[in-house]
Each structure stands twice: as structure tokens, then as C-alpha cells.
Amino acid sequence: MATAQEKIGSAARPVNTPDLYQLHGDQLHITYSTTSIDGKPRFDYQDASQTLAFEGDQIRTITTEIGTLVTVTICMTIDRGSTTFTLLVPTVNLDPSNQVRIEAKGITTIHRFSIVPAFNQGQTELYTVSPLTGTASFVNF
């Protein structure tokens, strides 16, 4: 990621924004990089039953006032819906060490769907929120 300049008195020092997030929680391990050696973002997801790797346009991001939402599809079915995992990434300003501890949230969403229209009533998204801790760092890919 690009480096911004922050004014401290009359001297300017670089302030790096993270490009690598390594997080974990109850049976979850997430590694998200906003870029890589080939310029594509990467997202590694591991839970108790599966390990998945995503890159490029398989990773969807949107910046909001509460942080950046980074979403990947972890399960897709033709007739029952899908499951997504969204990492809520907080805004982070790195200190001179280029690495800080952070807290984030992971949101697993079950998107219910049925090929039988009568079964598509009521709430169609079910959420599980997981607290995550780990590090945000700047790595020059």
C-alpha cells in the first residue's frame, strides 16, 4: 500500500497503512493481504472443517464508516443457498515498528434459499459473529 505523510512539528515521517492481517479466534484462522507479489489480494480462511484460499476478484471489499468489509464465499450450493465469511477490518495506523495488535470481527452468514418458492419466507440471512485478535502489519510485497 502507499505511504502517507504525517506532520509532527516541522518534521514529516511516513505512516504506513497495513497490507497484511493475521487473525485468529475460536477455531478460526484468517490471513488477509490487500496485495501480494503479483498485485492481487489474498485471503486464507481456516475453520475446524476446511481450509480455503481466495485471490483477486474472489475477494469482495467495501469501505464503510465502521471499517472495511472483506467478504469471501465459503460454501455455494445450487438449491439451498450459500455461506459467506466477512472480515470487519478496523482502520489502523501503524506505529514505527510497522506492526500492531488488533481486534476484529468475523461474520459468517448463511444465506438461505430454496428452489421451492413457498420455503423462501421469513429471515433469509443467519449470522454468527466471531471475535478475532491478531496483528496488522505493513509488508513490502
Image (cartoon, rainbow, N blue to C red):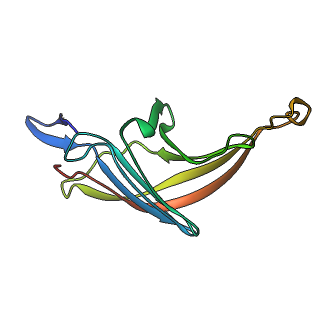
Q: Position of residue 8 (x, y in %)?
A: 16, 39
Q: Nearer the viewer, residue 115 or 124?
A: 115
Mark yes or no: residue 59 visible.
no
Report which quarter residue 31 is drawn in: bottom left
Q: Relative to 116, is 129 on the left or the right?
A: left
Q: Compared with residue 88, is residue 137 higher up or lower down, i.e. above or below?
A: below
Q: Relative to 11, is 20 on the left or the right?
A: right
Question: What residue is at 89 percent from the left and 37 percent from the top?
Answer: 119
Which image quadrant: the N terminus?
top left
Q: Position of residue 105 (x, y in %)?
A: 54, 52
Question: What residue is at 18 percent from the left and 54 percent from the top?
Answer: 96
Q: Compared with residue 64, is residue 99 higher up or lower down, i.e. above or below?
A: below
Question: What residue is at 8 percent from the left and 34 percent from the top?
Answer: 10
Q: Nearer the viewer, residue 28 or 96?
A: 28
Q: Relative to 20, is 80 on the left or the right?
A: right
Q: Position of residue 131 (x, y in %)?
A: 57, 59
Q: Nearer the viewer, residue 10 or 4?
A: 4
